[in-house]
Image: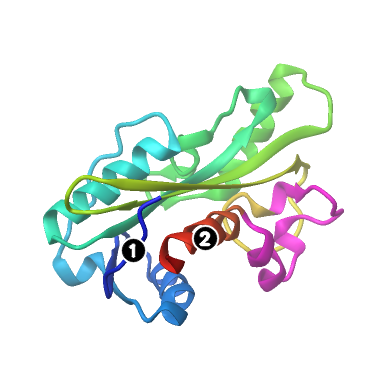
Amino acid sequence: MRTFSGSEILVASHNTGKIEEIAHLLEPFGIKVRAASEFGLDEPEETETTFVGNARIKAHFAAKETGLPALADDSGLSVAALNGDPGVYTADWAETGDGRDFDMAMRKVNDALQATGAAEPWVAKFCCTLVLAWPDGHDEVFPGEIVGRLTWPPRGDQGHGYDPVFIPDGHDITFGEMDRWEKNKMSHRADAFAKLTQAFEG
């Protein structure tokens, strides 16, 4: 694994919360986090069919445009009985003409499960792939996931996205019912971030 030896890293995202989360994670390593918005970067089209493929597109685009090492992620929900869908199209399932509607997206997933006739438990996992890319074209990949099952109807008003229908293994409440700090400790993103820190420890 190539270790990170610089003092600045670009987070290839316009999501303020995500940027703050990564900045907090990297603070102990003395690394300054720069946001894509500082450079006026557009978001490249995500044309791949895998999480790692789309994360690579974003990370390499940002590294090439700015000359800084860049970190990007792609994440989503994968349902076993739906052959891994919605997968990389997790956010697309929530798209409407007026923004994203995750209540609608959760209904779509449940309707698709009912149509398959699949018996419970409806095994599912949240996946997050982080890609750290350097301007010379090298990258390192850090995949994370958390396995669980889906439930219906949705439960809880915490979290976001599909959290109210996802119950992580070993628990009997959904991410939507869980304290967000408890959820953040075990999430797919936490798993990927824990692996990412290896690149900064040298």
Q: How is the image coloured?
A: rainbow
Q: Residues within 10 Å of mark 2 (few under 14, many from 20)?
A: many
* Drawn side of residue 137 relative to residue 184, left or right: left
* Drawn side of residue 183 relative to residue 72, left or right: right
Q: Residue 5 sits in which quadrant?
A: bottom left
Magenta highlight range: 164-187
Residue 150: give x, y in percent of width and height: 74, 40
Q: Which residue is mark 2?
A: 193
Query: Regarding mark 2 in the picture, which secondary structure is present there?
Result: helix
Frontmost residue, 15 versus 99: 15
Q: Residue at x 52, y 60 (%)?
A: 193
Frontmost residue, 56 versus 141: 141
Query: Regarding mark 1 in the picture, which secondary structure is present there?
Result: loop
**Amino acid bearing label 1:** Phe
Magenta stretch contains residue 129 = no
Q: Residues within 10 Å of mark 1 (few under 14, many from 20)?
A: some
Q: CA distance from mark 1 to mark 2?
A: 14 Å
Magenta stretch contains residue 166 = yes
Work out whether 146 lies above or below 181: above
**Amino acid bearing label 2:** Phe
Work out whether 93 lies above or below 73: above
Q: Residue at x 46, y 81 (%)?
A: 28
Q: Residue at x 40, y 29 (%)?
A: 49
Q: Mark on residue 4?
A: 1
Residue 76 in sight from this viewpoint: yes
Residue 101: give x, y in percent of width and height: 51, 49
* Drawn side of residue 61 relative to residue 152, left or right: left
**On-image quarter of the C terminus:** bottom left
Q: Mark on residue 114?
A: none
